Amino acid sequence: MAKLRIGALPDDRPVKRTITFTAAQNNLLRDYAAAIAVQDGLADAPLAEKLVPAIVERFITTDRGFRSRNEKEMSASKAENRSGLKGGETRGDTSVKDRPAI
């Protein structure tokens, strides 16, 4: 069968988390939701259950330190895949694990 252009689909099943906010954090979240409602002309403020995942995603995707660290790890992983070697191995590596049992 010919290889399809689209690979494996990402796992997009929701994952339920339970988090606890301080009263001050809850007030900030409520104020933020109210500001979104005013900005977007909504009758009701968005629920925290909808707002928190969006805030977390936005925070993580715009974090330069995290992004640069991830890019370094990805480029190192790609380099390993191109060479066919695992991290720390060299072409001349003749460790016992690669030798056939006699």
Image: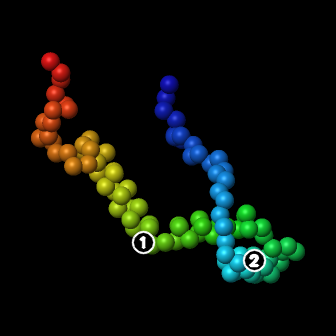
State the residue at coordinates (19%, 31%).
98
Looking at the image, which is closer to me, 32 or 25? Answer: 25
Which residue corresponds to mark 2? 30
Q: Is residue 71 left or right of residue 63?
A: left
Give the percent coordinates (x, y) of residue 3. 48, 32
Say which label, 2 or 1, has the lower sequence index. Answer: 2
Mark 2 or mark 1, whichever is nearer to me = 2
Disc 1 is placed on an element classified as helix
Give the percent coordinates (x, y) of residue 10. 57, 46
Count of marks placed on residues: 2
Q: Is residue 62 left or right of residue 14?
A: left
Circle 1 packing at 10 Å, graded few (<14), some (14-19), many (20+), is few
Dividing the image into 4 quarters, which one contains the C terminus?
top left
Q: Answer whether residue 86 is visible to the viewer in this image.
A: yes
Q: Amino acid at mark 1?
A: Gly
Which residue corresponds to mark 1? 65
State the residue at coordinates (18%, 21%).
101
Q: Amino acid at mark 2?
A: Arg
Q: Residue furthest right?
A: 43
